[in-house]
Amino acid sequence: MSDTATKIKVATIWIDGCSGCHMSFLDIDERILELAPHIDMVYGPLVDLKEIPEGLDLVIVEGAVANEADLHHVLELRKKSKFMIALGDCAVSGNVPSMRNPIGQKDCFERAYFENADTGQQIPTNGVPALLKNAIPVHQAVKVDLFIQGCPPPADAIFFVLSELVAGRVPDPTKVTRFGA
């Protein structure tokens, strides 16, 4: 990915998912110290920046693309990055967020905000990004260079992929992962 003398600029984003993939990333535990000399984490839930920086080497996307804000973020991240990873089954296949797709927005909203609501029965609109017609996997919105499946992917798989990338090799994550586990 880059020479070993330079740190790679990494961004992560958590869109429509449960944060389990980021938790799995944190489960790398002390092995993160092996990666730290090679990675500069510049954007994501673990970094307090509002603007997406330019010149990203690697973007790791967790979650499906489900609303206009998600779509805007992945388009901007793709434009500013050299390499993008779809992390976890939601990013890879749409998984749980895409379960709403066959139901349709109107019926989904009715169920969530009226049938299952005890108080305040209204569909939120103020400050909430509009849903896309369907929740989609990341690769249906932008080019993805590598897929790491799993719900969530095991920390060992994430560590393997990152270790290979900082060493300048593009790994095959299917050797250390499987869908749904």
Image: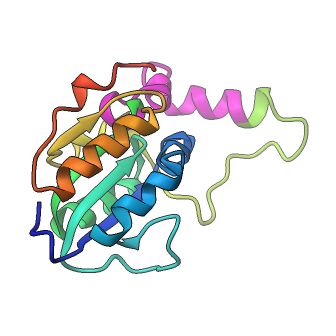
* In the depicted structure, whether residue 81 falls above or below residue 5: above
Q: Quadrant of the N terminus?
A: bottom left
Q: How many marks?
A: 0
Res 14 seen here: no
Residue, far right? 118
Res 125 seen here: yes
* In the depicted structure, whether residue 86 falls above or below residue 15: above
Taking the image as shown, residue 162 lies to the left or right of residue 120, namely left
Q: Residue at x 40, y 36 (%)?
A: 156
Q: Residue at x 29, y 41 (%)?
A: 160
- Foreground pick, 8 / 110: 8
Is 101 magenta? The answer is: yes
Residue numbers of the magenta segment = 90-112
Expressed as whole percent of the image width and height from the top left, the position of residue 58 reads 23, 61
Expressed as whole percent of the image width and height from the top left, the position of residue 76 reads 25, 67
Q: Residue at x 55, y 32 (%)?
A: 106
Expressed as whole percent of the image width and height from the top left, the position of residue 4 reads 15, 69
Q: Residue at x 23, y 74 (%)?
A: 7
Taking the image as shown, residue 141 lies to the left or right of residue 117, namely left
Instruction: Kindly indicate the quadrant of the structure image that contains residue 174.
Output: top left
- Foreground pick, 70 / 173: 173
Taking the image as shown, residue 59 lies to the left or right of residue 17, namely left
* In the depicted structure, whether residue 142 falls above or below residue 91: below
Expressed as whole percent of the image width and height from the top left, the position of residue 142 reads 18, 49
Instruction: Kindly indicate the quadrant of the structure image that contains residue 181.
Output: top left
- Foreground pick, 108 / 72: 72
- Most frequent secondary structure within the magenta stretch: helix
- Foreground pick, 56 / 32: 32
Is 156 magenta? The answer is: no
